[in-house]
Amino acid sequence: MLDYDELLSEQDKTVRYVYPLNTEKFPHSHFITVSVGEATSLEALDDTSSTVRARAARDLARRRSEMAVPRLVARLNDPSVEARAAMVLALGSIGDRSVWSELVPLLSDSSRDVRWQAAHALGELEA
């Protein structure tokens, strides 16, 4: 059986990337449970690789993980545009209206992708 905590701590970012990728492809695999996957994706939000952080945020969006909201809000200033946009996407997908005031300033983000995701997320929260 694979030890996903060990994979996530691997120094090679392509190996750390495996976990969030596999949960998207195989969400009901016999060796990945929702609770373990969700916890691992939460940890991956702090990974050194922006690709891993973005994948983790997208996984949490797919899961609509309400427990992820504080961690996603804390990462809205991520230096990576890809990761920042994924954090915003996740917050919109989860649908917690308490993040409205956190998303509004991102309508002025330096990245067009982040601005678009913020507008989309705010629309999701309004619906």
Image (spheres, rainbow, N blue to C red):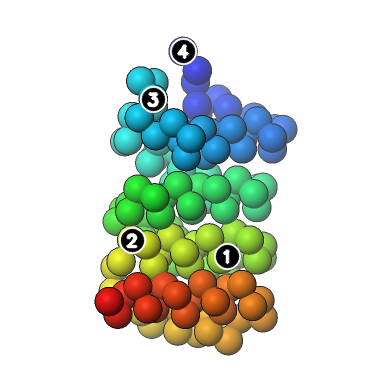
What's the amino acid at mark 1?
Arg
Question: Which residue is under mark 2?
Answer: 94
Question: Which residue is under mark 1?
Answer: 84
Q: Earlier in the sequence, mark 2 or mark 1?
A: 1
Q: Earlier in the sequence, mark 2 or mark 4?
A: 4
Instruction: Provide the secondary structure element on which disc 3 rests.
Output: loop
The answer to which of 116 and 56 lies nearer the viewer is: 116
Q: Earlier in the sequence, mark 3 or mark 1?
A: 3
Question: Which residue is under mark 3?
Answer: 29
What's the amino acid at mark 2?
Ile
Residue 59 is situated, as x and y percent measured from the top left of the image, at 45, 47
Binning the other alpha carbons within 10 Å of mark 1 as few (below 14), some (14 to 19) or many (20 upward) gives many
Instruction: Provide the secondary structure element on which disc 2 rests.
Output: helix
Mark 3 and mark 1 in contact? Answer it, CB < 8 Å. Answer: no
Q: CA distance from mark 3 to mark 1?
A: 28 Å
Question: Which residue is under mark 4?
Answer: 1
Q: CA distance from mark 2 to mark 1?
A: 16 Å
At 63% from the left and 61% from the top, the residue drawn is: 82
Please tell me whether residue 83 is drawn above or below residue 23 in the rendered image: below
What's the amino acid at mark 4?
Met
What's the amino acid at mark 3?
Ser
Please tell me whether residue 104 is drawn above or below residue 125 in the rendered image: below
Q: CA distance from mark 3 to mark 4?
A: 12 Å
